[in-house]
Image (cartoon, rainbow, N blue to C red):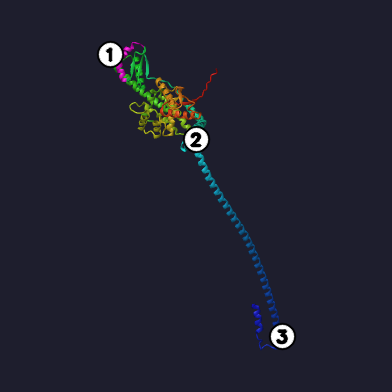
Amino acid sequence: MGLITNIFQGFSKKPQKKESVSRKPSSVSKGITAQNKAKEIIIEAKTQALKLRSSTEEEVRKIKAKVAEEEKIIIVQKAKIEAREKELENKAKTLRQARDTIEKKQREVSKKSEEQKKQLEKVASLTKEEARKVLLSKLDKDLISEKGKKIKEFEEEFRKNSDKLAQEILIDALKYGVTDIVVEHSTSKVKLPDPDLKGRIIGKEGRNIRAFEQLTGVDLDLDSSPGEITVSSFDPIRREIAKISLERLIADGRIQPARIEDLVKKTTNEIEHVMYKAGDNLCHRLGTYNLPKDVIQMLGRFKYRFSYGQNMLEHTLEVAKIGTVLAHKLKANVKTVKLGCVLHDIGKVITDKEGSHTQTGADFLKKYDISQEVLACVSDHHEDNPSTMEAAIVHLADHISGARPGSRGEDYESYIKRLKELEEAATSFDGVVKAFAVSAGREVRVLVSPERVDDASTALLAREIARKIELEQTYPGVVKVVVIRETRVTETAK
């Protein structure tokens, strides 16, 4: 448009008067040319405008077509949503009808159930509470049967997994604790080379024998067996001192109160030295060093001390070996277990204190700064529930050493009493007919009435009898309880 304006402005200018006539044709020619250009420009502008209009209309048409397509899609989706809503309404209606039907049926079932309960009460002549008691009674019987079966299953599974391992550990431990056990009594014998020496030992008015018995604390029996003198005392150390002193007196021949006093004093010192050497040797054999001298001296008393006929020195050595192996197997503190085994019975040789040997031994060791772990082994080795794992191992090792066959002697009356107590413990239960203690009291065979005790209840009964024996009685080793249930039917052919 600016170009057209410039062209028209060119035509509107007046010609200058100074120009000559000869230049006029040239100006006209230029004006015609400008007009042609203007027309061309106008035509070109119109052509461009038509093209722009055509492209704009095409774009508008496409937009309208797209909008129309989207409207169709929206209409279809709306129709689907309306159909879905209608379907959901139908389902909700169906569910409401089904719920109403179920509630109606439940009411009918409850009503029929109440009617049946009333009819059952009339037929059985039992009220609801009475029937409940009958059912519970039957359930109790079923539970007892099931309980017995479960106990039997658990015991079999436990034995399968643990018995073999426990046996291997204990047998291996016993191999390390084998020692020679000699059963001793409360008397010793001294042979007389000449029967006439009895009179010299008695002395004038019995002063020699009286002095000897007062100095040694023993009793001499010169009349029980010819050619021998019996030295009697419950204190093995005194008995050993008296025996050696008497042998030396007989060999010396100078039997008089002054000589007796000198020999008894000399022998006592020698025995003290022998006991110290025995205690030191025990510690050396087991590898327990740096113990106080008083403790070693006290351990040496085990050489002349016997418990149920079992020598305490050999018993301690055996317990220590067994306990050490068990500690290694069970990953416990080996040093604590070994020292606990060495010192566990030290209270038995402390004669000037009252109380149990476990507490007496622990009190004695406290004065020498023995560790609390070792003290627990000493004080708890006869307890049912030891306070530490190491104390439990010492308890087990001591139990094994004392309970193995042949290790200890026991008097006949105590043996019979223990067997009777085992039988009485078994017969105290309902349904038991007879009980017999066999295998030196290590097994109890229990006969039960088949009418009162069924097969499933026998396992439970055996466990209860074993538990009663554990809680109420003292016995070496273990006691096996065997419950026998037998049904016999006898018929006679005539």
The kind of secondary structure the magenta stretch mainly shows is helix
Does residue 289 appear in the picture of this structure?
no
Q: Callout 2: 10 Å neighbours few (<14), some, many (20+)?
A: few
- Disc number lying in front (2 or 3): 2
Helix, strand or loop at mark 3: helix
Rounded to the nearest angstrom, the CA distance separating label 3 from label 1 is 199 Å
Residue 364: image x %, image y %? Answer: 35, 30
Residue 263 vertical placement versus 394 (above, below): above
Rounded to the nearest angstrom, the CA distance separating label 2 from label 1 is 99 Å
Viewport quadrant of the N terminus? bottom right
Q: Is residue 336 magenta-colored?
A: no
Residue 126: image x %, image y %? Answer: 47, 36
Helix, strand or loop at mark 1: helix
What residue is shown with label 2? 124
What residue is shown with label 1? 205
What residue is shown with label 3? 25
Region in magenta: 193-215
Q: Callout 1: 10 Å neighbours few (<14), some, many (20+)?
A: few
Name which residue type carries label 3.
Pro
Which of disc 3 and disc 2 is earlier in sequence? 3
Q: Nearer the viewer, residue 259 or 398?
A: 398
Rounded to the nearest angstrom, the CA distance separating label 2 from label 3 is 147 Å
For the residues labelled 2 and 1, say whether their Cβ atoms are less than 8 Å apart: no
Viewport quadrant of the C terminus? top right
Q: Quadrant of residue 28?
A: bottom right
Q: Nearer the viewer, residue 248 or 356?
A: 356
Which of disc 1 and disc 3 is earlier in sequence? 3
Name which residue type carries label 2.
Ala
